[in-house]
Image (cartoon, rainbow, N blue to C red):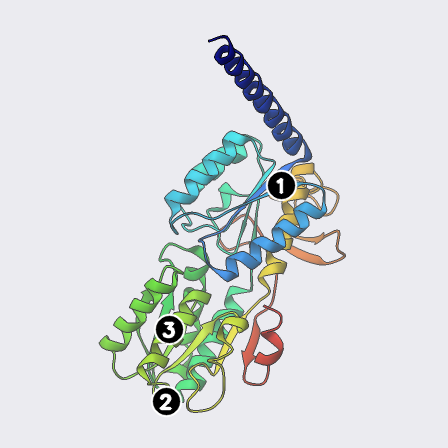
Amino acid sequence: MKDKRGLWAAACIFMIVGIFVSSCYGEQVHDKGTYAIIMKSRNNWYNELASRGYRQVIEAAGRNCITLYPDNATAQEQIRLIRNLIHEQVDGIAVAANDEYALSPVLKEAMDQGIPVVTLDADTEAGSRSIYVKPVDAGKLGQQLVQSVCDVCGGSGQWAILSAGSRSANQNEWIYWMKKELEGTRYRDLRLVDIAFGEGIYETAYEETKRLLDTYPDMKVICCLSTEGIKAAADVVSVRGIEKDVKVIGLGLPGQMADHIGDGAEDVCPVMYIWDPVVMGEVAAYLSLGLSNGELGDPNGQSGTNGQSGTSRQEIKLPDGSSYRLELGRGGGMEIISGEPIRVDADSVEYWKTQF
């Protein structure tokens, strides 16, 4: 009995010491400054690249970075993660929002707690974040996508859009500008027959592509607005052996789509577009750090050392030497465009697939 009591006492001592050491370590990590990035979904290489850029900048600055992905690509899952981060009192949150409106209340709560919020890739309502890092100029992208659809269709015929989430702000803005471009007389013989939603998930986009092809047998082009969507759509067309009849274009990662890209009749994807998601993540990280340490001040009012106070357009200079224009967005609030659309086709895919 005495030996058992001794073992029990020793176990208790080790447990207490372990808790103490763990607690001290956690405090040390938090003392470094902890920043978190939440992307839209798991198992998405585009999301991985963006979060990699964010993490590299945060860790190079000597801070701690938490990278989070929701178990399901829903606003509810992102809200749960954000609430946990508020409880942990992190020093900054960056999020690619699955829902423009649903995340706003919890992000406002984070800001009320003194936690700077940056959105990237997909935005929320302006009052729930400080700066939105836009991946690309939406008007320019929408114009280029519709022009490519027209070229591939030969100026006439049925086509469809395969978007990601119906409540994703970036997708909806791209579609808005695509519809504006369609108002031009050049496109009078093009017929947009459907807008489908693959939720940025390969399996869902795969099933939606099958539905589109079954519903519209005369369709010529599917224009996809997510990297998982374009890969799924191209795979369906290839499996069905209808590459000569239906083409897939849109937004994709060259490394994933290289086997489908080409200018031959048997090639599924004649052209697609992308930007550098790593740079987008890096810009978001620099802004998170600047907002947290006060260098940027309040971008919607008084600015810090890198801008001019009270203006709707500022020049933000980052530590890596790059500069970006901070502007007032369509929905109010400040935003930065982090990149330009990159055209990927038969002539350029070999280079771009080595980049991302």
Q: 237 or 270: nearer the eye?
A: 237
Q: Is residue 109 above or below residue 351?
A: above
Label 1 or label 2, whichever lies nearer to me, is 2
Q: Amino acid at mark 3?
A: Ala
Query: Who's the residue at 47% across and 75% down the image?
Result: 145
Which residue corresponds to the image point at 60% horizontal and 68% vertical from the top-left? 340
Q: Amino acid at mark 2?
A: Lys
Where in the figure is residue 155, as x and y percent of width and height? 40, 87
The circle on residue 244 is: 2
Farthest residue to the bottom: give it.
265
- Image height check: is 31 above or below 138? above
Label 2 secondary element:
loop
Could you classify mark 1 by the number of other residues whose Cα lies within 10 Å: few (under 14), some (14-19), or many (20 or more)? some
At x 37% / y 59%, what residue is drawn?
Answer: 199
What type is the residue that disc 1 sits on?
Gly
Q: Earlier in the sequence, mark 1 or mark 3?
A: 3
Of the numbered discs 1 and 2, the one sitting upstream in the chain is 2
Corner quadrant of residue 90: top right
Which residue is disc 3 drawn over? 233
Q: Which mark is residue 229?
A: none
